[in-house]
């Protein structure tokens, strides 16, 4: 993703955070909750880190999100769709959809929270 070499370590740590939280939570919670929580934690990390190193948040956030993407679920959903196994296709499609919704909603929640904090900070200044 053409990450600058000087911030590669921060992206790696972000990927480690997102993958670790998602794996730990997926054992007890569903795909939606684990991806949502991992994305919110990742976004908080990226906001803090981006301010410390004076880089745009998206340069750290986007590559760090890759471990959350539901690649195997998409693969198996398509595999079972081609093989006409409707039950398994629906299972993996549902898992893919929930993971995607968790990632998207986590990003929206984090972004909204940061904007609210910024606007409150500017009002107080």
Image (cartoon, rainbow, N blue to C red):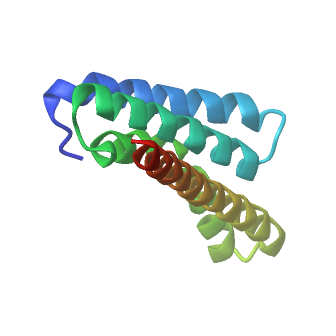
- Residue 12 appears anywhere in the view: yes
Q: Is residue 96 left or right of residue 63?
A: right
Q: Is residue 9 left or right of residue 36?
A: left
Residue 44, given in percent of the width and then of the height, sits at 50, 36
Q: Decide which of 26, 73 is in the foreground and name it.
A: 26
Residue at horizontal 56 percent and vertical 44 percent from the top: 39
Residue at horizontal 72 percent and vertical 52 percent from the top: 32
Q: Decide which of 52, 12 is in the foreground and name it.
A: 52
Q: Is residue 85 left or right of residue 55?
A: right
Above or below, comparing residue 98 to residue 82 in the picture: above
Q: Decide which of 99, 107 is in the foreground and name it.
A: 107
Above or below, comparing residue 63 to residue 15 in the picture: below
Above or below, comparing residue 2 to residue 70 in the picture: above
Give the quadrant of residue 85. Answer: bottom right
Residue 14, given in percent of the width and then of the height, sits at 43, 30
Give the quadrant of residue 41. Answer: top right
Give the quadrant of residue 59. Answer: top left
Q: Is residue 14 left or right of residue 113?
A: left
Above or below, comparing residue 2 to residue 12 in the picture: below
Residue 47, given in percent of the width and then of the height, sits at 41, 37
- Residue 69 appears anywhere in the view: no
Residue at horizontal 44 percent and vertical 47 percent from the top: 118
- Please state, as top left, top right, bottom left or bottom right, where the C terminus lies in the image: top left
């Amino acid at each position: 993703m053409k990450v600058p070499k000087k911030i590669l370590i921060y992206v790696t740590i972000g990927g480690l955070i997102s993958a670790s939280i998602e794996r730990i939570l997926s054992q007890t919670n569903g795909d939606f909750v684990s991806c949502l929580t991992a994305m919110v934690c990742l976004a908080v990390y990226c906001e803090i880190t981006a301010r410390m190193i004076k880089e745009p948040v998206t340069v750290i956030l986007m590559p760090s999100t890759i471990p959350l993407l539901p690649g195997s679920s998409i693969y198996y959903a398509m595999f079972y769709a081609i093989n006409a196994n409707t039950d398994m296709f629906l299972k993996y499609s549902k898992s893919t959809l929930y993971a995607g919704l968790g990632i998207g909603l986590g990003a929206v929640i984090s972004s909204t929270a940061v904007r609210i904090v910024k606007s409150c900070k500017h009002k107080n200044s």
